[in-house]
């Protein structure tokens, strides 16, 4: 990938609840100047989330926060341009969604609108995919709105499921695609390439 200038770089907040593998992908891409942005703070609702250690290892400010008012105040104080939900297992309140309209990106481990919404998160998604015996799954990035996993879709990648694949196989293959499209989504957001029209995400100067 072409490296970007750091001028006018975006300030990013990453919200996590777990190990932070998607967070690490963003950290690496920012350090390698693939993303024209800087992670200003990593916030978790769980004290033992390993993603906090990943952030500290990269000298990024961290915060454990379960209070939505404190969360909102922190995002405003840090002058955040983009909020990334990277395995954040908590529903954001409407006041945060309104304050950062079209500035919150979520990654989901399925092809929305399948296997999504309330109760579909993490390994639970892959268990349902396996149980249903579907032949394809994937990953989706989307902007966050008031309804879970219902915002404008940014990017999707397909993962073919072989008949011998286990739940662990599915999870591993989907995670690889998550990293790819999350980095692509954050990169293109930071390059000001997105606009939304009629609840659809368009990418400037690009045809699909």
Image (cartoon, rainbow, N blue to C red):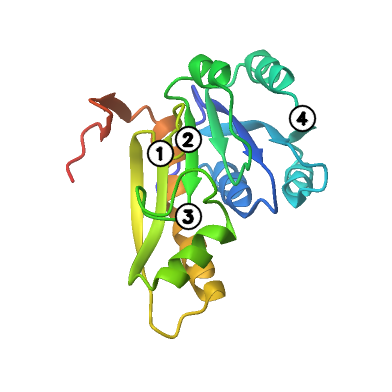
Q: Earlier in the sequence, mark 3 or mark 4?
A: 4
Instruction: Find residue 109 and name its label.
Output: 3
Q: Earlier in the sequence, mark 1 or mark 4?
A: 4
* x and y, in percent, of residue 146 in the image: 46, 26
Task: Mark yes or no: residue 181 visible.
Answer: yes
Q: Earlier in the sequence, mark 1 or mark 2?
A: 2
Crowd band around label 4 with a 10 angstrom C-alpha radius: few (<14), some (14–19), many (20+): some
Q: CA distance from mark 4 to mark 2?
A: 19 Å
Query: Are the two marked residues, 3 and 4, in contact with CB atoms closer than 8 angstroms?
Result: no
Query: Are the two marked residues, 1 and 2, in contact with CB atoms closer than 8 angstroms?
Result: yes
Q: CA distance from mark 3 to mark 4?
A: 24 Å
Instruction: Find residue 142 and name its label.
Output: 1
Asked which secondary structure carries label 2, the reply is strand
Q: Earlier in the sequence, mark 4 or mark 2?
A: 4
Of tags 4 and 2, which is closer to the observer? 4
In this rendered view, identify the residue nearer to me: 1 or 10: 10
- Residue lying at the far bottom of the rendered structure: 164
Q: Residue at x 75, y 30 (%)?
A: 66
> Which residue carries the number 2 mark?
105
Q: Residue at x 47, y 25 (%)?
A: 103
* x and y, in percent, of residue 183 in the image: 47, 46
Asked which secondary structure carries label 3, the reply is loop
Crowd band around label 2 with a 10 angstrom C-alpha radius: few (<14), some (14–19), many (20+): many
> Which residue carries the number 4 mark?
65
* x and y, in percent, of residue 29 in the image: 54, 47
In the displayed structure, 172 sits above or below 14; it is: below
Task: Mark yes or no: residue 34 visible.
Answer: no
Q: Earlier in the sequence, mark 3 or mark 1?
A: 3
Q: Quadrant of residue 201?
A: top left
On the picture, is 148 further left or further right than 55? left
């Amino acid at each position: 990938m072409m490296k970007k200038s750091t001028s006018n770089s975006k300030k990013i907040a990453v919200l996590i609840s777990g190990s932070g593998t998607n967070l690490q992908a963003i950290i690496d891409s920012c350090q390698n100047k693939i993303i024209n942005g800087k992670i200003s703070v990593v916030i978790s609702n769980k004290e033992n989330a390993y993603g906090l250690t990943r952030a500290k290892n990269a000298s990024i400010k961290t915060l454990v926060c379960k209070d939505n008012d404190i969360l909102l105040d922190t995002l405003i104080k840090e002058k955040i341009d983009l909020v990334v939900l990277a395995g954040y297992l908590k529903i954001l309140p409407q006041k945060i969604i309104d304050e950062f309209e079209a500035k919150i990106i979520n990654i989901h481990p399925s092809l929305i609108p399948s296997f999504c919404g309330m109760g579909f998160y993490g390994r639970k998604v892959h268990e349902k995919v396996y149980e249903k015996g579907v032949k394809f799954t994937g990953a989706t990035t989307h902007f966050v709105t008031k309804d879970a996993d219902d915002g404008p879709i940014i990017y999707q990648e397909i993962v073919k499921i072989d008949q011998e694949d286990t739940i662990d196989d599915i999870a591993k293959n989907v995670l690889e695609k998550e990293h790819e499209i999350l980095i692509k989504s954050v990169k293109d957001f930071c390059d000001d390439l997105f606009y939304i029209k009629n609840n659809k995400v368009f990418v400037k100067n690009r045809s699909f």
